[in-house]
Amino acid sequence: MKSDTTKKISKLTLPFTILIASLVLGGFFYASQVNKQRSIERQQEIKLQDDRRIQEAKVEQEKKEYVARRKNECYGLYEKERDKWNNVKDFGYSEVRDVCIVKYKSSEPARSKEDCEKIIKNTSEMSEELRDIIFEAYSDCSENWFSKQF
């Protein structure tokens, strides 16, 4: 005959084994689900990054197309002005200010180099748009031209 202790141990062995097995299987299942969730989150993050890159590329392409269109329009304006006036010398498109600039030879006497250089002093602390305007004025001064914006 088995002793009472042995009987008690044998009665508890099966539930204890089931409990341990359940904990081990539960742990594996939990770890698997956590890993799966992390994988899904990584895939979602990668998709969001791809979507952002695609959107940024689309915006950049639209900007390039806009600039190309504006440059083409600017050239058309230049040709019209050149047909009208004999002093039309050059043209350019400023992306910073989004304007077409047509340059004309001035009938005014040319200014000295020193006068023109006074225009561009202390431009490093200015906004990009203001620097663009100032360098345009300096260029006009040094070439003895004047500009019209369209």
Image (cartoon, rainbow, N blue to C red):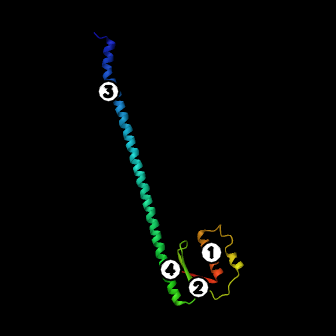
In front of the other: 142 or 39: 142
Q: Quadrant of residue 35?
A: top left
Q: Which residue is mark 1?
A: 135
Q: CA distance from mark 1 to mark 2?
A: 16 Å
Task: Identify the residue at horizontal 47%, vertical 74% (top origin).
Answer: 68
What is the distance, in whole Å, between disc 1 and disc 3 at their CAs? 84 Å
Where residue 34 is drawn, which disc sits there? none
Q: CA distance from mark 3 to mark 4?
A: 83 Å
Q: Earlier in the sequence, mark 2 or mark 4?
A: 4
Identify the residue position indicated by label 3 in the image.
Answer: 18
Query: Which circle's residue, 2 or 3, is located before the other in the chain?
Result: 3
Residue 120 can be seen in this image: yes
Say which element carries label 3: helix
Direction from residue 56 to residue 26 in the image, left or right: left
For mark 1, give the secondary structure.
helix
Q: Are the residues at dot 1 and dot 3 in contact (C-beta closer than 8 Å)?
A: no
Residue that numbered label 2 is attached to? 104
Mark earlier in primary sequence (3, 4): 3
User: Residue 10's image quarter?
Assistant: top left
Q: Which quadrant is the N terminus positioned in?
A: top left
Q: Is residue 70 above or below residue 33?
A: below
Q: Amino acid at mark 2?
A: Tyr
Amino acid carrying mark 3 in the image: Ile
Report crowding for label 4: few under 14, some 14 to 19, many 20 or more residues within 10 A (C-alpha). many
Q: Earlier in the sequence, mark 4 or mark 1?
A: 4
Residue 145 in the image: state x and y as whole percent: 62, 83
Residue 74's disc number: 4
